[in-house]
Image (spheres, rainbow, N blue to C red):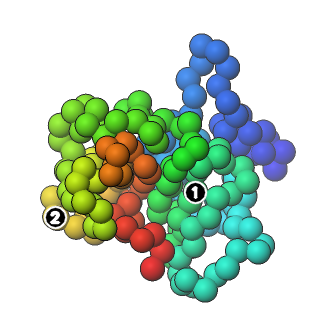
Amino acid sequence: MRILALLILLACAPAEEGSAAAVLTPGGFGPLTIGMPATEVALAVGGPPGTMRRDVSASCEAYHPEGLPEGMSVMIENQRLTRITLTAPSAVETEDGFKVGDDGDAVEAALPDAAVTPHKYEAAPSRYVTIWASGDTEAPYVTDEDGRGIRYVVDGSGKVAAIDAGGPSIQLVEGCL
């Protein structure tokens, strides 16, 4: 158990100068892998706060574990990790080198294969820039549980307001329903 805890601390620790920092990928972050059981998430980075309200849905929880960087939260659906979300003030970058606060046009330009769709609640320039890395992702709404991707949420100022990584749940606008 102590070895596991040490490995987790090393995976989430800030990088030393000259070393690579943990980055958010479609498949996870540090010790977290999309699809892993909620019990393993809790062991790796902590479970939901004891005071967390659970009246949204018994099958879905979204929270910030203590063992993750500031501005990072997880979504657990049906006792599996399905999404990792970055919001301000997160300094974590994606594997493509983008972070919250970056220019949405720069994200779009760097990811020419990404699907760009209108934001559900806000007018342009708000939008979603979604890039799928794996799975059957040809449908307008991806349902393949093996699908993995990253969605950049661009706000009305044209900046990245949030980043979601994981499976099909990255498409859920409201998070847990």
- Secondary-structure class at tag 1: strand
Residue 130 visible? The answer is no
Which mark identifies residue 139?
2
**Residue at the location (24% across, 50% down)?**
125
Left-right relation of 94 to 51: left
Please give the residue where the numbered disc 1 appears in the rendered image: 73
Q: Nearer the viewer, mark 2 or mark 1?
A: 1
Q: Label 1 amino acid?
A: Ser
Inter-mark Cα distance, 2 to 1: 27 Å
> How many labels sit on residues?
2
Q: Position of residue 38 (x, y in %)?
A: 61, 66
- Secondary-structure class at tag 2: loop
**Residue at the location (30% across, 36% down)?**
107
* Res 101 → quadrant: top left
Within 10 Å of disc 1 (Cα), the crowding (few <14, some 14-19, many 20+) is some
Left-right relation of 50 to 25: right
Q: Label 2 amino acid?
A: Ala
* Res 158 → quadrant: top left
**Residue at the location (50% across, 54% down)?**
85
User: Disc 2 or 1, which lies upstream in sequence?
Assistant: 1
Within 10 Å of disc 2 (Cα), the crowding (few <14, some 14-19, many 20+) is few
**Residue at the location (78% across, 45% down)?**
5
| Camera-nearest residue between 74 and 119 | 119
Q: Position of residue 141 (x, y in %)?
A: 22, 67
Which quarter of the rendered picture does the C terminus lie within? bottom left
